[in-house]
Amino acid sequence: MSMSKRAGIGDTISFKKKDHTTIGVVYLTQDNSVLVEISQEDTAILNLENNKTVVAHKNYTLLSKKNKKIV
């Protein structure tokens, strides 16, 4: 994924986890991944302990950049 297609803090991404498509907001970026906050509903569906998860850069689609829609 090119640097321009990488999500930044505040961006909205879509990703698939446990066969469920989820939308979340990036709150931290790292070299190989982003940390994302997801809805409580998705947290329950995915049976996660909290509403934060890690997603590799190669495993998401960037939907919007801080209030600017892309897709």
Image (cartoon, rainbow, N blue to C red):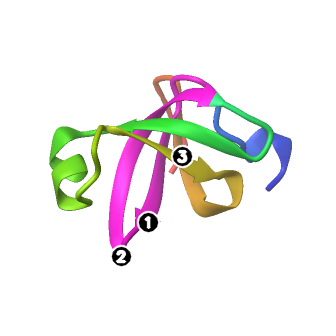
> How far across and how far down the image is residue 61, in percent?
56, 56
- Magenta range: 9-28
User: Of helix, strand and loop, which one carries label 1?
Assistant: strand
Q: Nearer the viewer, residue 48 or 10?
A: 48
Q: Earlier in the sequence, mark 1 or mark 3?
A: 1
> How far across and how far down the image is residue 37, in percent?
39, 34
Residue at the spot 80% in from the left edge and 39% down from the top edge: 31
Q: Residues within 10 Å of mark 1 (few under 14, many from 20)?
A: few
Residue type (three-letter) at the residue carrying disc 1: Lys
**Disc 2 to disc 1: CB gap under 8 Å:** yes
Left or right for 13, reference 29: left
Left or right for 21, reference 33: left
> How far across and how far down the image is residue 19, in percent?
35, 76
Res. 70 image quadrant: top right
Residue tagged 2: 19
Between circles 1 and 3, the one closer to the viewer is 3
Q: Earlier in the sequence, mark 3 or mark 2?
A: 2
Up the image or down, 18 lies above or below 3; here it is below
Residue type (three-letter) at the residue carrying disc 3: Val
Q: Nearer the viewer, residue 31 or 9?
A: 31
Magenta span contains residue 19: yes
Residue 16 image label:
1
Residue tagged 3: 54
Structural distance between the alpha carbons of marks 1 and 3: 12 Å
Residue type (three-letter) at the residue carrying disc 2: Asp
Up the image or down, 71 lies above or below 35; here it is below
Up the image or down, 51 lies above or below 46; here it is above
